[in-house]
Image (spheres, coloured by chain):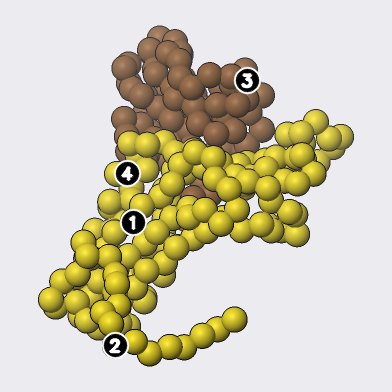
Chain colours: A yellow, B brown
């Protein structure tokens, strides 16, 4: 249910991202969904090539600061076994104005998904499981391609 | 022959059955090593879908391997 409210109390936020010059702050949280490609997902696992994932992630954040007029950017990605609703990734961007914050945040999410060496294994309600983007029917011993 | 440390992740780790090993190989390039390992351990991902990391940097498959390199073959990623 969408809801709009007013408050006279201070609205809470993440203190570590506050900067006097930052008029805009955008957060994206990618969460574990219960459905993928029409299949019911029970849980999933993320595995990372740790050192290269952190190195590549930091390069992406540095690139975002060069590409967009933003003040700062942060990203955290979860590894291990996640349940439905768990946060897989959080990206935060602070900038003077909101347009750059929205654009930089979207770009960072896209680049993380494209470049960072992290892999996802989904576990389905029917008991099957598979590495996303990695497995073809032939890998599971089916006949032919 | 070169001694190359190979690390495996995700679908390669499961297929190979371990996370890392030192292989002795005469494969000149990363791509040659991938084809060698793929044939031996029945990796089914075609080379075009796989990236290589050599000593913590993404490198083209044509990159020549040197003794002591650490190589990771990176299957299609799915983070975020």
The subunit carrying tag 3 is B
Q: Are marks 1 and 2 on the same chain?
A: yes
Precedes in sequence: disc 1 or disc 4: 4
For disc 4, the chain is A
Numbered tag placed on residue A54 in the rendering: 4
Secondary structure state at the residue bearing disc 4: helix
Compared with residue A132, is residue A142 higher up or lower down, i.e. above or below?
above
Q: Is residue A63 visible?
A: no
Which sits earlier in the primary sequence, circle 2 or circle 4? 2
Q: CA distance from mark 1 to mark 3?
A: 36 Å
Would you name the residue on which mark 1 appears? A75
Q: Quadrant of residue A10?
A: bottom left
Choose top left, top right, bottom left or bottom right for residue A27.
bottom left
As drawn, the label of residue A8 is: 2
Mark 1 or 3, closer to the camera: 1
Residue at mark 2: chain: A
Tell which of B54 and A34 is nearer to you. A34
User: What is the CA distance from the residue labelled 4 to the residue labelled 3?
Assistant: 29 Å
Whole-percent x, y for residue A116 in the image: 41, 48
Q: Secondary structure at mark 2?
A: loop
Task: Verify CB contact (< 8 Å) between mark 4 and mark 3.
Answer: no
Please name the residue that numbered disc 3 is placed on.
Answer: B41
Residue at the (61%, 58%) spot, across then down: A33
- Do tag 1 and tag 3 residues touch (Cβ < 8 Å)? no
Comparing labels 3 and 2, the label whose residue is closer to the camera: 2
Labels 2 and 4 share a subunit: yes
């Amino acid at each position: 249910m969408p809801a709009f409210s007013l408050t006279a109390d201070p609205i809470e936020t993440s203190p570590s991202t506050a900067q006097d010059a930052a008029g805009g702050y955008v957060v994206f949280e990618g969460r574990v969904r219960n459905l993928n490609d029409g299949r019911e997902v029970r849980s999933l696992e993320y595995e990372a090539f740790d050192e290269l994932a952190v190195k590549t992630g930091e390069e992406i954040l540095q690139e975002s600061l060069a590409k967009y007029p933003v003040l700062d950017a942060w990203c955290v990605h979860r590894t291990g076994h996640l349940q439905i609703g768990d946060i897989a990734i959080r990206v935060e961007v602070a900038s003077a104005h909101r347009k750059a914050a929205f654009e930089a945040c979207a770009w960072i999410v896209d680049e993380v998904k494209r470049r960072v060496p992290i892999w996802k294994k989904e576990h389905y309600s029917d008991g099957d499981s598979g590495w996303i983007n990695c497995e073809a029917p032939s890998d599971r011993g089916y006949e032919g391609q | 022959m070169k001694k190359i440390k190979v690390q495996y992740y995700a679908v390669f780790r499961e297929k190979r059955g371990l996370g890392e090993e030192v292989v002795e190989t005469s494969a000149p390039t990363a791509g040659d090593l991938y084809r060698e390992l793929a044939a031996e351990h029945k990796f089914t991902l075609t080379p075009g879908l796989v990236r290589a990391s050599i000593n913590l940097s993404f490198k083209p498959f044509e990159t020549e391997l040197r003794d002591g390199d650490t190589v990771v073959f990176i299957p299609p990623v799915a983070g975020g």
